[in-house]
Image (cartoon, rainbow, N blue to C red):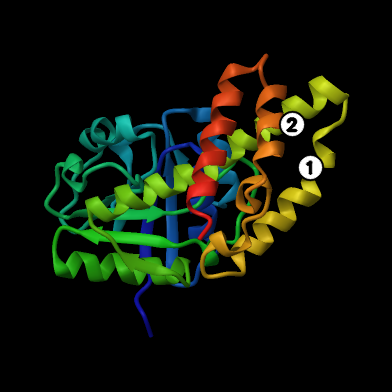
Amino acid sequence: MSKTFSVVIIGSGNVAEALAQACSEAWGVELLAVVARNEERGRHIAKLADTEYIGDMGEAPEADFHIISVSDRAVAEVAEQLPEYEDTILLHTAGSVDMASLGRERCGVLYPFQTFTASRKVDFSQVPLFVEGASEYITSQIEELAANLSQNCYRANQHRRREIHLTGVLACNFVNALYTMAASRLESEEGLSFDVLKPLIIETAMKASQVENPRSVQTGPAVRGDRATAERHIKMLEKSPQVQEIYRLMNDYIFSNKN
């Protein structure tokens, strides 16, 4: 029988919420507490995960893992405030933060590659988890914990995590910004709601997720070489120069990468 790992989550953001719920529901994981300075959010997450809330970092209980899930810039500061137990492994969940920022010998990274939103539950068993440890033994312990939380676990050093994080910004944050541009244009020019775009977005995402490379399902004027339509669209965007430039750059990128 595999070992049951005790875990304390430190933080009150969206990742902390998702991770706390995943730990509370996973076999082989015992969630001891949520530790957070934001009492309202901390208590809310603790309630969702059916565990104890602790407001003082210095009172975080001893556990197999302390997992810091805060903003990138706060990781080192929070690590300094936590008690240092002899057998506890300290982790953070950031994609772009060096493991050394934790300032401990027994440390590592558990990076969940997914977008998280408060009060929106995800199937954590499908979330890719990228792990790194300060030693081979610690890495193997993090891998065991990760395997209890997700079916998709990989090793990734700092360089690899940063590359993965960059691709996430492109595929998630930037794509969502394009949704926002499209929704704003549709509403301001034609008075239509975002609902009109939703079937198109869903079908596009489904197609992309079912192929080896989304280039193979790219559609639109650029991939067809339809410069007349593209130029008409660019002209229509004259009153929105920033969006116009984004359209021009994206159109050129698709055209030059269509093969």
Tell me where residue 127 appears, x and y as whole percent. 50, 61
- Between 56 and 237, the residue placed more toward the observer is 237
Name which residue type carries label 2: Ala
Q: Residue furthest right?
A: 191
**Which residue bears the numbered disc 2?**
183
Residue in the picture at 33% in, 35% down: 72
Residue neighbourhood size for the residue with mark 2, other residues' Cα within 10 Å, grouped as few (<14), some (14–19), many (≥20): some
The reply to whether callout 1 and callout 2 are in contact (CB within 8 Å) is yes
Q: Secondary structure at mark 1?
A: loop
- Between 49 and 131, the residue placed more toward the observer is 131
Tell me where residue 11 appears, x and y as whole percent. 42, 38
Residue in the picture at 19% in, 50% down: 85
- Between 92 and 61, the residue placed more toward the observer is 92
Residue in the picture at 28% in, 52% down: 62
**Which residue bears the numbered disc 1?**
197
Mark-to-mark CA distance, 1 and 2: 8 Å
